[in-house]
Amino acid sequence: MVKSTSQFAESDSRTPTHPGGFLVIENLVKAYPTAGGGESVVLDGIDLTIGENEFISVIGHSGCGKSTLLKIVAGLETASGGSVRLEGREIRKPGAERMMVFQHYSLLPWLTVRENIRLAVDEVLKRVPAREKQQIVNEHLAMVNLTAAADKYPDEISGGMKQRVGIARAIAIRPKMLLMDEPFGALDALTRGKLQRQVLDIWENQRQAVMMITHDVDEALYMSDRIVMMTNGPAAKIGEILDVPFPHPRDRASMRNSREYFDLRNYVLNFLDHYFTQD
Ligand SMILES: Nc1ncnc2c1ncn2[C@@H]1O[C@H](COP(=O)(O)OP(=O)(O)OP(=O)(O)O)[C@@H](O)[C@H]1O
């Protein structure tokens, strides 16, 4: 039985689904000005609460506003209405407690792998002694299997390795929340699968709040606790939120062979099809 929460259900859709959640988005609206002097509403009344150890995915058709939503949580964009609070504090700008991983790596090309991670650690963990910082960098290099490539420059390593640097850099500063915008989108299928496993391993060992944008239904089902399914834009809303009931640690092969997985996968695909055909 597929369990989901519809934002359009009769019950109060503004009530957070996780009362103890530490990221609380309430009635969020985002509009951009148009050339004609009007405005175009991208997000219209988003309500979402995320728990501090919860991994959620956001899925929806291209242009519905997924990245805009993530950027508002990151503090890179401001909301036009409503509120976004982390542990009760309104998010107004970027902060080290919310680290972003982009699809296109964004490494500094003149720094080595190690130096890219170290730079973030130096900037955020200012009071930590140098020796400990070095340990943190080494530990995170090992976590993403990059110890051997530590002294290489970004243009000397593959796309998958670059993304591992981006992930190590983000988690090395121990953020409370990891924000990932299609983190595996630029990778080939094999590398993507390996990196999904690696990130899930890390998360299963040291849980934190994760919000991940994806277009990939299997990725969302494999990795997340809940899938937030957005309606098409303009004025996109959360259509439904799907619970993914598989316990962690997850085994992809056995999940995929289960009837429940098949039903959930079809449920998400049908949701996306429904909105696509409305275009
Ligand atoms: N800075 C901006 N100024 C004006 N409009 C913008 C701006 N950023 C995004 N938009 C518009 O907001 C809408 C949502 O964009 P967004 O990138 O958030 O969608 P998305 O769901 O992440 O898309 P994709 O899946 O293709 O990455 C689009 O119509 C886009 O053109």
Image: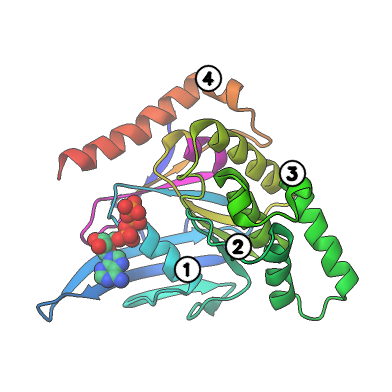
Categorize mark 2 by other alpha carbons within 10 Å: few (<14), some (14-19), many (20+): many
Q: Earlier in the sequence, mark 2 or mark 1?
A: 1
Total residue callouts: 4
Q: Which image quarter: residue 68?
A: bottom left
Residue where numbered disc 1 is placed = 73
The reply to whether the C-beta atoms of the residues labelled 2 and 3 are less than 8 Å apart is no
Residue 202 appears at what percent x and percent y?
70, 46
Which residue was labeled with disc 2?
177
62 or 272, which lies in front? 62
Viewer-closest of 113 and 255 = 113
Q: Position of residue 89 (x, y in %)?
A: 55, 79
Give the secondary structure at mark 2. strand
Disc 1 or 3, which lies upstream in sequence? 1
Q: Secondary structure at mark 1?
A: helix
Q: Nearer the viewer, mark 4 or mark 3?
A: 3
| Cβ atoms at labels 2 and 4 below 8 Å apart | no
Q: Is 81 placed above or below 21 here?
A: below
Vertical relation: 62 (above or below) 235:
above
Q: Quadrant of ligand 1?
A: bottom left
Q: Is tag 2's residue or tag 3's residue first in the polypeptide sequence?
A: 3
Which residue is pictured at 41% across the width and 41% down the height?
4
Residue stretch rendered in magenta on the structure: 219-238
Q: Is residue 225 magenta?
A: yes
Q: CA distance from mark 2 to mark 1?
A: 10 Å
Spatial CA distance of label 4 from label 3 is 31 Å
- Where residue 80 appears, as percent x and y from the top left, is 31, 77
Mark 2–mark 3 Cα distance, whole angstroms, equals 22 Å
Q: CA distance from mark 1 to mark 3?
A: 29 Å
| Disc 2 + disc 1, Cβ < 8 Å | yes
Amino acid tagged 3: Asn
